Amino acid sequence: ENGNPGEHELLAGEHGEAMAAARWLAVQPDVDVDQLSVFGTAEGGALAALLALDPEAPFATIAAVSAVTTTTTFARWQRDGGKALPFDVNDPVEQRRRALLPNAAELARPPVLYVVQDDVEGARDAQRLQGRAPPLVELVPVPGDATTAGLTHPEAYTRALHGIPGVTLPR
């Protein structure tokens, strides 16, 4: 999306593309599948989080910063920003295709959701998800705003995702 060629689907078709890429990556000879992780921010975070629903996803860790996890985000985008969405935000079938919250009970593996402290609505949405999902969904508060949080400490995120002893994310 964001000016790229192709059909604007907003998280409906990208899941299949991400899974195809993950399957390809997982069988490469130089890839340790036990260390394969996926990480995204904002809409990319939403896609990463949706991969947590797929039991075939070959990821050891799934994590996201400022992920779109609830359908209220789509309605908010349309209402406040006038963002043109390629689906009816009130259609429950379309909502289930694009947001983690309506599918929370079906998580195949729990994601780690980094919740940006300055994103009040996003934090509230993540807490709603944690209340509805299996208790293993981890919410980690991080400083900053939704635009910069994933960019200000990328090495710390990467190292924390791989469980390197003694590494914690900045708070």
Image (cartoon, helix red, strand yellow):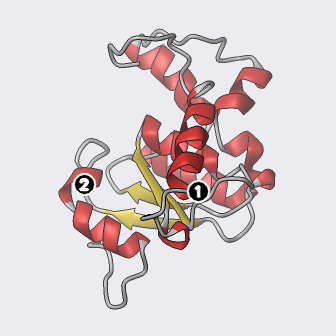
Pick the quarter of the image with the C terminus. bottom left
| Circle 2: residue type | Gly
The image quarter in which residue 4 lies: top left
Q: Is residue 158 left or right of residue 57?
A: left
Kind of element beneath mark 2:
loop
Q: Report x, y in % for residue 151.
A: 22, 52
Asked if 107 appears above or below 92 in the picture, the reply is below
Residue at the spot of label 2: 144
Residue 106: percent from left, percent from top? 80, 52
Whether residue 165 appears in this view of the structure is yes
Of residues 9 and 75, the one drawn nearer to the viewer in this rendering: 9
Classify mark 2: residues with Cα within 10 Å, few (<14), some (14-19) or many (20+).
some
| The furthest residue to the bottom | 166
Q: Residue visible at 42% across and 10% down?
A: 82
Q: Residue at x 53, y 22 (%)?
A: 10
Which amino acid type corresponds to the residue marked 1 in the rendered image? Gln
How far separated are the C-alphas under marks 1 and 2? 18 Å
Q: Is the N terminus in the top left, top right, bottom left or bottom right quadrant?
A: top left
